[in-house]
Image (spheres, rainbow, N blue to C red):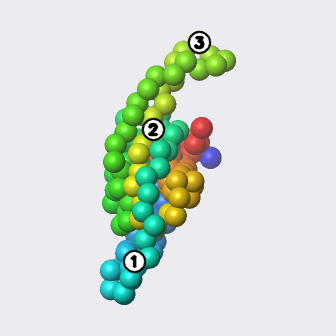
């Protein structure tokens, strides 16, 4: 992918994210309007692949804007790379989710959002 496809990738991400907002809003609304509680709340620790403060801020904001999820906080720890001399920052988000079922499911959902976001915001489209 090149920087020429960047505007298309951003637009594609926005359309996908709007669908996620509608889907999760429907789930929360249905749970609130029907008897009983269908939520299975939990907290997951998610290591991100975000390289910049902008990327991690966007990811945390989009998680929080999605109904049923909330970014509780972030831990930013420099970790020495095994095969490189420089150090890389490992950013970890703590995410509360109402409907994921368990921490692994929440991590999968956040990972999908992160992958799509990074492909959209990085000019070259890479996620690594």
Which of labels 2 and 1 is toward the front?
1
**How much space separates mark 2 and mark 1, taking CA atoms?**
30 Å
State left or right for residue 34 relative to residue 86: left
**16 or 1: nearer the eye?**
16
Q: Secondary structure at mark 3?
A: loop
Task: Identify the element where label 1 is drawn.
Answer: loop
Q: Quadrant of the C terminus?
A: top right
Tell me the residue at 53%/58% (across/down). 102
Which of the two marks, 3 or 2, is nearer to us in this view? 2
The percent coordinates of residue 65 (x first, y second) are 33, 60
Q: Residue extending furthest front?
A: 36
Q: Which residue is mark 1?
A: 37
- Residue 45 is situated, as x and y percent measured from the top left of the image, at 47, 44
Q: Is 67 above or below relative to 2? A: below
Please, is residue 59 above or below residue 23 in the view?
above
Q: Nearer the viewer, residue 32 or 37?
A: 37
| Residue drawn where x is 39% and y is 77% of the image | 37
Q: Earlier in the sequence, mark 3 or mark 2?
A: 3
For disc 2, the neighbor class at 10 Å (few under 14, some 14 to 19, many from 20) is some
- As measured in the structure, the alpha-carbon distance from the residue carrying label 3 to the one carrying label 2 is 22 Å
Residue sitting at x 44%, y 57%: 42
> Mark 2 touching mark 1, by CB under 8 A?
no
Q: Is residue 50 above or below residue 42?
A: above
Query: Any mark on residue 92, and which?
Result: 2
Residue 62 seen in the figure: no
Question: Can you identify the residue that label 3 sits on?
Answer: 85
């Amino acid at each position: 992918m090149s920087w020429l496809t960047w505007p298309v990738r951003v637009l594609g991400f926005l359309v996908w994210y709007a669908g996620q907002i509608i889907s999760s809003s429907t789930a929360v609304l249905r749970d609130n309007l029907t008897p009983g509680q269908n939520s299975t709340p939990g907290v997951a620790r998610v290591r991100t692949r975000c390289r910049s403060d902008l990327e991690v801020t966007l990811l945390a904001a989009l998680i929080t804007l999605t109904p049923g999820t909330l970014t509780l906080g972030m831990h930013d720890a420099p970790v020495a790379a095994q095969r490189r001399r420089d150090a890389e920052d490992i950013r970890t988000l703590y995410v509360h989710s109402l409907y994921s079922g368990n921490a692994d499911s929440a991590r999968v959902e956040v990972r999908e959002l992160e992958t799509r976001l990074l492909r959209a915001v990085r000019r070259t489209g890479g996620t690594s």
